[in-house]
Image (cartoon, rainbow, N blue to C red):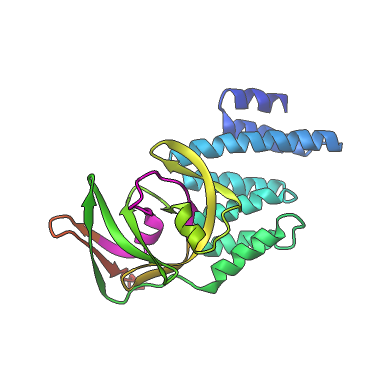
Amino acid sequence: MALADLANAASQYPAAIDYLLRAAQQVDNQLRQRQLEASLLSVTDSYARTLVGRHQYAVLDRVYEDITLALPELGDYFLALGLLRLQTGNPQAALAVLAQIQNHGRLGSQARQLMADIEVSESEVLAGLEVLPLRQQDGHLLVDALLDNRLPVTLLIDTGATVTILEPRALARLGYNLQGRQAYFATANGVVQAPVLALGRLALGEAGISQLAVGALELQLGESIDGLLGMNFLRHYQFRIDQDQGRLILERQRRKAP
């Protein structure tokens, strides 16, 4: 644990985690166990911020998975891994992880709710083409969308955003609970924490995705913009932005022949 503290202070996070997982095999009392868990939380929190800032989500996935394999009694890492996989567009892998803690005394209700949200519906994919008008504002491209088939919103298209982000005010109007588990998001102002949840449906015209993971985050882009349309929506389609004609063109992904 002393070596882990030194590695953490030097920002050598993988080494620090490795030392702590070794130490976990030798902990012999509750006080040491609490100290180890606190140290592991501190290291993984710092490492997660760094990895999200670099968009290295696959590395963070392996970090969380290694911890769940080594210390399966620490349910928080199962929940963190499930949220990460939901956030990065891998709901089936998230289900497998969340199922491990669905009966956990403290985290079970959160895991079961996320599992229920994921299982409600799989992603819809538009059959054919959808052509949507775009508007320009301060150099940004905006598109109209519909949340849960009832709330019209305006989204800024951001192909550099891994996850779709919505303003908390819009989600609150739809009755979503914004007090749940938080995840890290990379923004123009650095890495921040925000609630992550499964949106019932996000639609652009007839193109829609159900149970899409979104972050609830204040973006300060102005009252007329309600969020960012990220790649966890756009990757379901072959999309093209025609700036000359002011159009967003979405086409169903063609499946490769076996």
Range of magenta residues: 213-239
Q: Residue at x 23, y 44 (%)?
A: 138
Q: Furthest-left residue in view?
A: 244
Using the image, determine if residue 140 lies above or below residue 170: above
Where residue 97 appears, as percent x and y from the top left, is 62, 59
Q: Foreground: 90 or 145?
A: 145
Query: Is residue 88 at least partly visible in the picture?
Result: no
Answer left or right for 234 relative to 39: left
Please identify the residue farthest to the bottom as the structure is shown.
Answer: 127
Residue 255 in the image: state x and y as whole percent.
34, 71
Q: Is residue 54 visible?
A: yes
The residue shown at (66%, 38%) is 41
57 left or right of 126? right
Residue drawn where x is 51% and y is 58% of the image: 172
Q: Residue furthest right?
A: 29
Q: Is residue 73 magenta?
A: no
The quarter in which the C terminus is drawn is bottom left
Residue 24 x/y as whole percent = 76, 38
Number of marks in picture: 0
Q: Quadrant of residue 107?
A: bottom right
Estimate the x, y position of residue 188 in percent, counting from the top left: 38, 38
Task: Identify which residue, 197 or 76, lies in the foreground.
Answer: 197
Q: Is 214 in the magenta?
A: yes
Q: Quadrant of the N terminus?
A: top right
Q: Is residue 106 above or below residue 249?
A: above
